[in-house]
Every structure is written in C-alpha cells, then in structure tokens.
Amino acid sequence: MKQNIIKALATSFIAVTLFMGHVLPGNAQFTYAAAEFETKTATLNNAKISFNGKEPVTIQAYNIDGYNYVRARDVTDAVNMEVNPILNGEIGIMITSDSPAQLGTPLETLNIKSIKVTPVKGEITYRGVSFYTECFNYNGRYFFKLADIAAASEQSLQLSLELLELQANGDVAKGPMIDGFSSVSVQWNADAGIINVSRVEHDFIKMFNKIRGVEVVAPEEEQNKAITPIPNDNKVSVQPPLASAPEVGTKLANILIDESLGAYTEDGYIIEENLEPVYDKSMSIGQCTWYAACRFHETTGIDIVTIGSPNKVYGSGLTNWVRVSIEKGSEITGIVDRKAITAQSIAVWDGHVSFVEFVEYDDNSNPITVYYTEANSGHDGVNHIEGVYYPDFDCLVQKSSLEDFINRVPGEFSGYIVAK
C-alpha cells in the first residue's frame, strides 16, 4: 500500500512538473532556422467569424499565404478570456482562459491594405502551457494565426487531461487539480465562408468521477428542483426579433407599469415573478437604464436587474455594465467590439444606454445602419424634464449609421450587452 502511495505521488509530481515547467513534446522542442523567416506581404482581409454560434461579425486580419493572422484580443474578448503580452523581452501572448477578458480601449481600425512583415518565432502561453509558432508584430500588436490559437488551446487541454487521468487512476487525489478547463474551438465552414469560433467548457470533476467509476447523485432537494417547474404566470410575453427595419418614429415597446398586467410595478421597478421590488431608484421610470432593461426583458425574457442594478453588483456607474455582464452573466454576456452590434442588445456608454432594435448589413456582413430606441435623451429641461418618461417623446424608433450611433453620446463607448 505504501509503495502504491509513493508511486502515485511520484507520478503526480512528474505530471505537475511537466505542466508547470512547460516541458512539452513537439512544437516546444522545435528549432526555427533563420532562413524560414523571410519578409512576406500581408494583405488586409475581413474575416467573417461566428463567436459561440452568434450572428457572424467581421474581424480584421492580415492574410499571408492563405492564412489569416488576427490580433488575439479580437478573439479572446469575444470568448471572454484574459490575454496579456509576455513580459521580460519574450515575444508572444499569455491567454488565461479561466479569467474574464479585461476590457480596455477598442482596438484600432486597420487601414493599410498591404504591409511587409518578417514573421518571427513567437509563443502562445495558454493557461501556463507554451506553444511556439510564427507571428509578427505590427504597430505594437502581435498577430497570430487563428488556427494556432486553437492549437495552443488544444495542446494545453490534452496535457491537462493527461494529468487528470493520472490523478483519477492514482490512490491519493480526492479530486482533480482543477475543476474545469475552457478551450477554444476553431472550425471553417467553407460553404458559408464563415469561421466558427467557440468557447468550449470541459467539466473535469465529472471526468474525474467517471474515470474513478463514481456515480454522483444530486441531493434530493436538487433533484426535485430540477423536475418541478417554477410558476411564472406574471411574466410578460417575449417579443420576437424584427424581420425587417422598423419605421422611424414608431413605438415598439409595450413597457408595462401595472403589476396586474405584467412584470413591472406601478413605480417602474422590475420584479422577478411575484417577489417584492428590491431595486434602487436608478431603475425608476424615465431613466435610460430603466427603459433599456425593460425593453431587453420584453424582447429576450431576461431580467438583467436580477444580476445587479448599477449601484449594486454592477458597481458605480454604467462603465461597469458590460464588464459585469461578461464576468457574472449566466444568460447574458458583454461584447466590446463596436462592430459586433446585434439586434435586441443594449448599447452602453459612460453615462447612457440605448436599446438596439434592428441592424442592417452590407453585402460583406458589415453593420451599416442601426435602428434604436431609448429614454431620457434629448430632454431640454424645459419641455421635457430629465429623468421623466414622456410616452410620446421617449422610446421612439430612431435611425443612424453605425459610426454616428457610436459617437452620438459624449461619454466613452463601452460595448453591448447581449443574450447568450
């Protein structure tokens, strides 16, 4: 028995040493010859990418020899993973899939259609495991092949699975070293001309128990909860997405303020089913946040206020709405790419929110026209008092180009809140 324990400890120690020390087979041992890095022409290309099964968006990339090289943040922000440059003079990036994306300033628009670059040996460290490949740096940004980001993810996943199997087959570990693993999947749909990029979750606890042959049974109360439907007789009907552009000046929202008719109290606070309202005054009728939250609920069935009102979980001010939606949302997420606008989303600025009703795209799937509604905007303080809801003035359909829509509010644009 003692020898078995020692053997298990030694095996686990070796696996952990391999894992933490980045000692890997294959690409990590590969030595690049200087001749391989000849100067090449990189051509600006718009790649159509569907993130997590959502409507495809256009991501700028540079194409070399038929391969798209992308900025890592264009991918990691969309799948909610943290990315940072490798320090200490090394070339490459670190992706931490178990940490949320750190929202920074939007990436700059690429305007140069053709550039000369010399690829170099770079490193993608995915959750502590190094993957070496070629990349190039342009204007302070590292560009990697999209396929290599997925390959780095897969390599790290496979090493983690090997360690998981060693732990599960040993006599010492009571559970896996990590509960789960988030990887990146990249698949090319040739027929549609779209790249499908998804965040894939792997439940290591379930895998560990399966290898051990342990059947996990949920507590009785959890089993009952899973099969007993929760009554929801007081919820408003969800409006389907618009099939065509709405007429400017029309009113689409049917924001209910009578508790007997729907999910909102006469004071304008959103409530969850028949619970008493517990939210603060920042969500009262007339505020832009009140309208956007109500309209989002009306079209998606999701009450974002149960996740947190601005002065509670979201923190102080609207600047945190998108970040918290990424970090804490089970039914929603945040998108920081301003071009990734979609219908039935909330656009967020520092100081204002609007609801996106419909988006028109050009032949290249680039968003060009935005139809939106909002409250508490354009109030002059005389005819329309700030913070007061005017049914014949507020929340009417407006139309503008994407660029004008983004820049119409003085505050910095933060991103969008969308349903998953």
Image: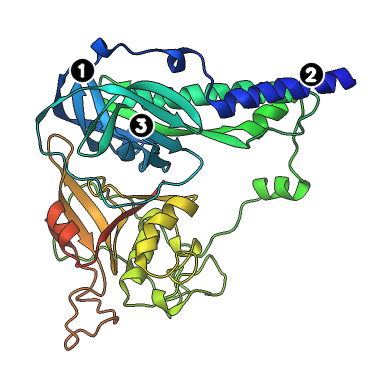
Sequence-wise, which precedes: disc 1 or disc 3?
Answer: 1
**Rounded to the nearest whole Å, what is the CA distance between mark 1 and mark 3?**
22 Å
Please identify the quarter of the rendering in which residue 74 is found.
top left
Which quadrant does the N terminus fall into? top right
Residue 28 placement (x, y as % from top left): 45, 18
| Label 1 packing within 10 angstroms: few (<14), some (14-19), many (20+) | few
Q: Which residue is mark 2?
A: 7
On residue 66, the disc is 1
Name the side, left or right, on which 71 lies relative to 8: left
| Label 2 packing within 10 angstroms: few (<14), some (14-19), many (20+) | some
Residue 132 placement (x, y as % from top left): 39, 21
Name the side, left or right, on which 219 lies relative to 355: right
Residue type at mark 2 is Lys
Please identify the quarter of the rendering in which residue 170 is found.
top right
Q: Which residue is mark 3?
A: 92
Sequence-wise, which precedes: disc 1 or disc 2?
Answer: 2
Residue 20 placement (x, y as % from top left): 58, 29
Name the side, left or right, on which 7 lies relative to 265: right
Residue 147 placement (x, y as % from top left): 34, 23
> In terms of secondary structure, where does tag 2 sit?
helix
Q: Which residue occupies 21% across, 73% down?
A: 377
Looking at the rendered image, the disc whose residue lies closer to the viewer, 1 or 3, is: 3
Sequence-wise, which precedes: disc 2 or disc 3?
Answer: 2
Q: Which residue occupies 51% across, 14% down?
A: 25
Residue type at mark 3 is Gly
> In terms of secondary structure, where does tag 1 sit?
loop
